[in-house]
Image: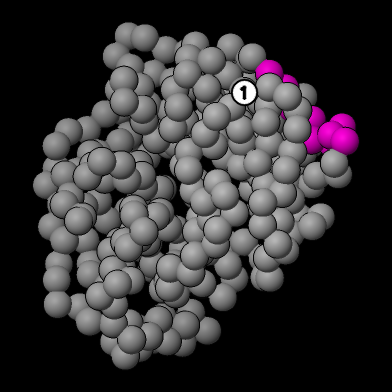
Amino acid sequence: MKKTFLLFFILFIAVSYGQDKIFVATKLDSTALVADNFMGYDQFGFYYSIKNNVLSKRKKDESFEYKNISLGRPTKIDVQNPLKIMLFYENFNTIILLDNQLSETQKINLSENDVPIMATATGIASQNRLWIYNSLTQQIGLFDYLKNVFQSITPSISGSIKYYQSDFNTFQWIDNNLNWYSCDVFGKISSLGKVAFFDQIQIASNQYIIFLKEGKLYVQDLKNKTISPIENVEKSFKNFYYKDQILSIFTNQGISNYKISIP
């Protein structure tokens, strides 16, 4: 079954896309890290990771930790704003906001909201708001965490979310049929194309994605319909993270950072 699926994946690439380019990564440095998962880094050079349900923020000799015994392991961690870090605990329908020292500033139990909410996707948005996908209505909305007000901004979305990623102004998701969509803060939904089969994935821009399949990293250009391999990176790793032309590979030994030029 696995060989059949791999053959289908290779044929999909060969028929649907070109492969006339190879992305060669240049190794910059390595950092030792013992963790279960690497979550990314911020503009101040702090690395975020999870080990035994504890969120750690580290840089050289400076470190902070956050653990919530009653909620357990967070489902999603958003570190795009180092002054307002978001932890989402899907099993408890709860969001925790932390400051830059990982001290808890706000706990939001969405089950107590006046508007019924069952969140399955969340993220930091602009203007003191959070992105929320409400599975009860299958709508994307914005939650003002200062006023405790939630507003849906889209009609119901067909299909389920396989992967999602957000920034201050957009919420992007890939559904189970591998269709890629983007929604802005006004509720406008755009279709960005169809992505390749993946084991792990990260959206690099509105045109490019990086994905892992069968232990190999690729860059998919949806505008020009190409899928290109990434060479000169670790062959075995737990997960990867891409930001500002830096590809970070997390292995059992730590983090290896590579320079890679994706337009």
Percent across and percent down for residue 68 are 68, 21
Q: Is residue 91 left or right of residue 203?
A: right
- Give residue 87's quadrant in the image: top right
Task: Give the camera-side residue of 125 and 70.
Answer: 125
From the top left corner, tell me how far across and down residue 154 is, in percent: 66, 57
Residue pictured at 51% horizontal, 72% vertical: 178
Residue drawn 34% across the image and 53% down it: 204
Up/down of 57 relative to 163, above or below: above
Taking 40 as reference, is 116 above or below it?
below
- The boundaries of the magenta stretch are 106-114
Residue at the spot of label 1: 97
Residue 252 falls within the magenta-colored stretch: no
Which residue is nearer to you in this view: 219 or 64? 219
Residue 205 visible, this angle: yes
Q: Quadrant of the C terminus?
A: bottom left
Helix, strand or loop at disc 1?
A: strand
What amino acid is found at the position of numbered circle 1 in the picture?
Leu
- Which residue shows up at 14% across the image and 37% down it? 28
Q: Residue at x 48, y 14 (%)?
A: 100
Query: In the image, is residue 135 above or below residue 242?
Result: below
Horizontally, is 241 left or right of 93 in the view?
left
Could you tell me residue 104's position as x and y percent?
Answer: 63, 15
Q: Position of residue 15 (x, y in %)?
A: 31, 90
The residue at the far front in this view is 186
Give yes or no for residue 107 being in the magenta stretch. yes
Question: Where 56 sits versus 131, above or below?
Answer: above
